[in-house]
Image (cartoon, helix red, strand yellow):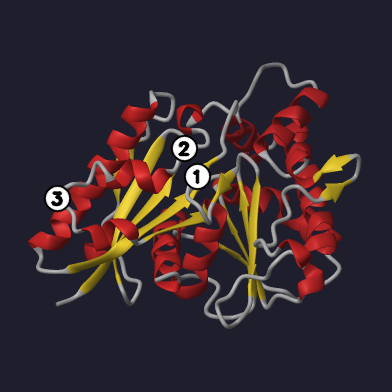
């Protein structure tokens, strides 16, 4: 009998999920996408998660497999050890604030053996991406740094033994989003809102999305090009301050803004003190996040 993990990558607008083997391959290379219902009531949110889990659990039983448990990649703030969402006032999952996730899911999964219901592990979504890239992506089982460039600046650093580098005495995974940077924190400079803010500084004639700013930059618009050049300069300085001291063998970028890498690459590299560290762009953000959630479950059972 083959062993499988149900792996779930939780977002504010959608939830992606898949069945992963215990050797960390996605079954049939298939990721399923479901609505998140993140602004619904507590019951609706948990009913939705339970339905997703039961759907995938049924598939595992159908193929004659055994389910080892459930791995979740969740955005923060979140109590990952206890399985309790701490998100409040950020436009998603407000209704499940401070509610024990495992308890709510377990009593909805009456047809699933209790031993499976108890085996759950929660990990930050950026860390799930990092773990997936380490095992099956660009990290290639070496000491590496992972930065997701999107709504905020997610990050994780992993040693060559597959364990996360921890943040000093806090004994939490080392992340850079809330580290001091200039007059504020990293997240205020390396994020979608930073690019939108720059667009206002350069007095673009209309309210534009990051995608449209990028498209105009590629078309040669000088102000839009300057926005990404500034972003690259800031990112290079952040890497100098918070990543290079750990001597990673490779830096892997993920997230939506990483698709615009050619627009900020040169300015970032110009600022980086160590230009010999390879920079890789993930080609499999969703798959890596699913694999990472499964890997975290395997590390915790």
Q: Residue at x 82, y 71 (%)?
A: 245
In the rendered structure, which disc, 1 or 2, sits on the residue that comes first in sequence?
1
Q: Evaluate whether residue 284 shows in this view.
A: yes
Q: Are marks 2 and 3 in contact (CB under 8 Å)?
A: no
Can residue 282 be seen here? no
- Disc 2 target residue: 99
Label 1 vs label 2: CA separation? 6 Å
Please give left or right for residue 282 compared with residue 249 in the image. Answer: left
- Above or below residue 50? Residue 279 is below
- Residue at coordinates 45% horizontally, 72% vertically from top-left? 299
Closer-to-camera residue (136/96): 96
Using the rendered view, name the quadrant where residue 168 is placed: bottom right
Pointer 3 with pointer 1, Cβ within 8 A: no
**Disc 3: which residue:** 111
Report the front residue among 230 and 205: 230
| Residue 216, position as x, y percentages in the image | 64, 33
User: Which structural element holds mark 1?
Assistant: strand
Graded by Cα atoms within 10 Å as few (under 14), some (14 to 19) or many (20 or more), the crowding at tag 1 reads some
Q: Is residue 266 left or right of residue 36?
A: right
Placement of 38 over or under 233, stated as above or below = above
Rendered view: 140 above or below 224: below
Say which quarter of the image contains residue 69: bottom left
The local secondary structure at tag 3 comes to: loop
Q: Are marks 1 and 2 in contact (CB under 8 Å)?
A: yes
As measured in the structure, the alpha-carbon distance from the residue carrying label 2 to the one carrying label 3 is 23 Å
Residue 84: which disc?
1
Q: Nearer the viewer, residue 205 or 46?
A: 46
Q: Position of residue 13 (x, y in %)?
A: 43, 33
- Mark 2 and mark 3 lie on one chain; the one further toward the N terminus is 2
Q: Residue 166 location, x and y as percent?
A: 69, 67
């Amino acid at each position: 009998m083959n062993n499988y993990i149900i792996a779930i990558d939780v977002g504010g607008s959608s939830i992606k999920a898949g069945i992963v083997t215990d050797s960390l391959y996605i079954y049939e290379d298939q990721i399923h996408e479901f609505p998140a219902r993140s602004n619904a009531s507590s019951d609706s949110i948990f009913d939705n998660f339970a339905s997703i889990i039961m759907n995938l659990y049924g598939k595992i039983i159908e193929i004659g497999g055994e389910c080892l448990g459930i791995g979740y990649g969740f955005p923060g703030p979140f109590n990952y050890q206890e399985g309790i969402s701490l998100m409040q006032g950020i436009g998603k999952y407000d209704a499940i604030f401070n509610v024990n996730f495992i308890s709510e899911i377990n009593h909805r999964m009456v047809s699933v053996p209790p031993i499976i219901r108890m085996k759950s592990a929660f990990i930050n979504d950026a860390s799930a991406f990092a773990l997936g890239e380490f095992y099956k992506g660009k990290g290639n089982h070496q000491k590496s740094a992972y930065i997701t460039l999107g709504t905020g600046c997610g990050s994780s650093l992993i040693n060559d033994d597959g364990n996360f580098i921890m943040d000093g005495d806090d004994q939490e995974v080392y992340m850079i989003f809330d580290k001091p940077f200039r007059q504020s924190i990293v997240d205020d400079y390396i994020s979608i809102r930073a690019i939108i803010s720059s667009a206002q500084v350069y007095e673009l004639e209309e309210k534009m999305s990051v995608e449209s700013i990028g498209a105009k930059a590629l078309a040669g618009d000088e102000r839009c090009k300057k926005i990404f050049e500034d972003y690259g300069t800031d990112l290079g300085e952040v890497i100098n301050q918070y990543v290079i001291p750990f001597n990673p063998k490779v830096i892997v970028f993920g997230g939506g803004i990483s698709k615009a890498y050619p627009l900020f690459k040169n300015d970032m590299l110009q600022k980086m003190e160590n230009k010999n560290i390879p920079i890789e762009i993930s080609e499999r953000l969703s798959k890596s996040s699913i694999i990472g959630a499964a890997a975290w479950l395997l590390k915790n059972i």
